[in-house]
Amino acid sequence: MKALLLTGRSLKQGIGKEVGKVTEKYKESVAMCEIHPKDVEELGIKDGENVSITTKFGSVVVKSVSSQNIAEPGIIFIPYGPYASMLVDYDTCSTGMPTLKGIVAEVKPAPSERILDVKELVKYLGR
Amino acid sequence: MVIVQNIVCPICGCACDDIEATVEGNKIVKVKNSCSISASKFLNFWKERNLSSLIRKNGELAPTSLEEAVEKTAEILVNAEYPLVYGFALSGCEAQAVGVELAEEIGGVIDNQTVTCHGPSALGLHDVGMPGCTLGEVRHRADLIVYWGSNFQEAHPRHLARYSALSEGRFRKGRKDRKVVVIDVRKTPSARVADLFIPIAPGQDYELMSALRMALNNDEIEEESVAGLPVDKIEELAEMLRSCQFGILFYGLGLTMSRGKERNIDQAVSLVCDLNKWTKFVIMPMRGHYNVTGMNEVTAWQTGYPYAVDFSHGYPWYNPGETTSIDILRRGECDAALIVASDPLAHFPKEVGQNLCKIPFAVIDPHMSMTALAADVVMPCAFTGIEAEGSAYRMDTVPLPLKKVIESPPGILSDEELVGMILKRVKSKRRR
Ligand code: SF4
């Protein structure tokens, strides 16, 4: 399914980051993707099942969350953090600011794929 | 048991200065007046904490002495040709000032989290200025409050209660005296507390602001709808904006991070300027970290520029797009870094993070983070505003004192002290 990816703050992410950035609580708050209930249906997944999100810039597996916060189908939301950062556009168009909202993405069911933890993401980045 | 009052909350740009903490035996056991994020920090910050300096040996981080960590950091920075000093939005102004001095000493770049939040606001401000006010004025006077691209209920949970719609001011007594408009691409919890929620199509903020300006100036809009909003609704909104007595446009990352970036800010400021033909209207960015505004102030008073300042020429040079940390790292120009109170690996686009992982870098942070896990040197520091004093600038650039509520664990210094130790070591190495 094609979608437009938005990133941003969430209350859970705010609370999770204050507990600690390598804790399970933080991971749970950021390794997720809010999807419109109609899109959850279209994907044929159960709410909470893992999905893979792919953009021109990268790919990541996160947990799906059916959400009324999404105003209309075709829009998905991932909170700021290590998972959203795998997918966003690095080009700043000479402004210094990367594009972190409004990125074209492909969403696929990934019930058998695992969500990487922060340590695994560090390895993936090259350390 | 001691009750410490009027603590400035060291989390978001609201910098609420009424937090009350109950301290028992150097531990905060209860907090009052805090939001859920603030309570999470005050009650949990000491858990999951790293209390030892770490250094990378054979590919793994291993405990080391603070002296060795400082020595290694100084060595990394002195040996670099184009080092980056990054972060400080969660530090006090005093640490920030030492950070700027360090960047100048090593001929590097000093940059901060503005680069991934309100950098475009700084650029917009350079272009067209910014008619602002303090949050106190909003509380006393505002009868129309517009939040554009800001999910304040989740990012700044007490903003509504302390500074805007729910606050009791001199001339506006509370919610019934004010109207709240939320304009956003998502129906966030913030949209639900608004009198009017306007959902707009992603990436079309610029178009909607242009249309609003046209409606205000009685120009004909030759479309049926703009950004998903029918023209008659745009005209109604324009009328609502110009007929208030004191309006404020609070805007968030929905404007700075989307298509248009600093042009969105130009347009938002121009809209507010237009509105001042009819009424009093002001604009304010919803700054995220509690002292990112302070880092802009400190960098500006020391160098003339608010962020992304390059000292490699021997004098301060500022050109966002060229001297911004994201661009320097993406182009692979930077060859070492010191990261202070920040987690860029978790928040920079992947390619940029991968390039940071290719160079030696040190981290000063009270917590372990994704960036700390990847660092060559990690130095734990005290939590400023809880375990160390300092100063911070609220989102409206009002400076506030940060309190030391409890003692930091033995041997854990403030980031100001740690950056100062590195600076001293760098100076002595360079003079050899
Ligand atoms: S709104 Fe922000 S500054 Fe105020 S208590 Fe909550 S996190 Fe702290």
Image (tube, helix red, strand yellow):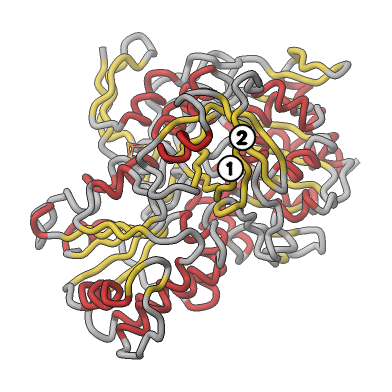
Q: Position of residue B309 (x, y in %)?
A: 68, 59
In primary-sequence order, the first of circles 1 and 2 is 1
Residue that label 1 marks? A1
Quarter of the N terminus of chain A within the rendering: top right
Q: Is residue B417 visible?
A: no
Q: Secondary structure at mark 1?
A: loop
Q: Position of residue B85 (x, y in %)?
A: 70, 45
Categorize mark 2 by other alpha carbons within 10 Å: few (<14), some (14-19), many (20+).
Answer: some
Where B127 falls versus A46 (above or below)? below
User: Which amino acid type is shown beneath numbered disc 1?
Assistant: Met
Where B45 falls versus B432 (above or below)? above
The answer to whether dots 1 and 2 both sit on one chain is yes
Q: Secondary structure at mark 2?
A: strand
Which residue is painted at 48% across and 53% down in the image?
Answer: B293
User: Which amino acid type is shown beneath numbered disc 2?
Assistant: Lys
Which residue is painted at 59% across and 33% down in the image?
Answer: B415
Q: Is mark 2 within 8 Å of ligand 1?
A: no
* Camera-nearest residue between A19 and B296: A19
* Chain at tag 2: A
- The mark found on residue B158 in the picture is none
